[in-house]
Image (spheres, grey):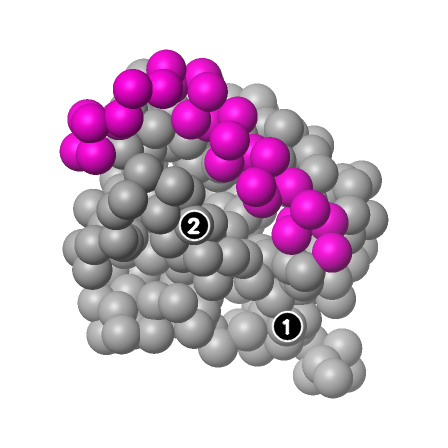
Amino acid sequence: MDKLLHRKQAVIFDLDGTLVDSMWMWKAIDMEYLGRFGYGCPEDLQKSIEGMSFTETAVYFKKRFMLEDPIEQIKKDWTDMSIDKYRHEVPLKPGGKAFLEYAASLNLPMGIATSNSREIVDVVLNALGIGHFFCNITTSCEVSRGKPAPDVYLKAARHLNVSPNACLVFEDVPAGICAGKAAGMTVVAVEDEFSREMREEKISLADYFVEDFYALLPKEGRG
């Protein structure tokens, strides 16, 4: 599969659950946050908000749980709750650093297209020391529709000055995979513990499926 990169002109990554192992953290934050208002965390919550932008998710929480706080306050609370964890507890997915170095060695421009906020993305990239790999960061808050709509991926491709069909996308959940496919891009689904029960759905939707980023490295670069 390492030859796949040689057929593309740019690489775009989703962030949470794809490039970094962070989805466990967001479930914990949802539980803690809703607990402040006397709510438990509904079983269908994660699937319901899958792919939504940070702002869309805040709107959804406000409406579903009848929260009095304004949207911007909800987003600020989530950001405050997550930043320390991102700095100290969230690692890159296995093989992530080696893959970024390999793609950079091929002079492939790389971008991030995420449903998360720009503030959080900057914290993650700085904490992991990988910000220099990316030419562009695009968030779903910058477009009119979050995933599974293709908007964030199409905008990322424009920023990278590459045709969508020349882009390789990495995603971890069905909504993101559908967004990349709707944009006309080749999509690689990445295994993640949080979405393990969706594995067969991810395989059926994506062009490729990998357990980790080592699978995409030349044999001599795997560890």
Residue 60 picture location, percent across and down: 24, 30
- Neighbor class of circle 1 (other Cα within 10 Å; few <14, some 14-19, many 20+) is some
| Left-right relation of 212 to 155 | right
Label 2 environment density (alpha carbons within 10 Å; few <14, some 14–19, many ≥20): some
Q: Secondary structure at mark 2?
A: helix
Q: Identify whether 145 is placed above or below 43.
A: above
Tell me how many marks there are: 2
Which residue occupies 34% across, 74% down? Answer: 196
Q: Secondary structure at mark 1?
A: loop
Give residue 138's position: percent from left, percent from top.
53, 28
Q: Nearer the viewer, residue 79 or 97?
A: 79
Main SS class of the magenta portion in the image: helix
Q: Which mark is residue 94?
A: 1
Compare marks 1 and 2 and give the one earlier in the sequence.
2
> What residue do we see at 71% from left, 81% from top?
222
Label 2 sits on residue: 32
Residue 67, can we see it? yes
How far across and how far down the image is residue 100, in percent? 71, 56
For the question of whether residue 155 can be seen, the reply is no
Along the horizontal axis of the image, is 187 left or right of 206? right
Q: Position of residue 133 (x, y in %)?
A: 75, 44
> Magenta span covers which residues?
62-88
The one nearer the camera, 120 or 212, is 120
Question: Which quadrant of the view contains residue 220?
Answer: bottom right
Q: Is residue 45 above or below residue 146?
A: below
Q: Which amino acid lies under the numbered mark 1 shown in the image of this protein? A: Pro
The C terminus lies in which quarter of the figure? bottom right
Above-or-below relation of 210 to 45: below
Nearer to me, 89 or 68: 68
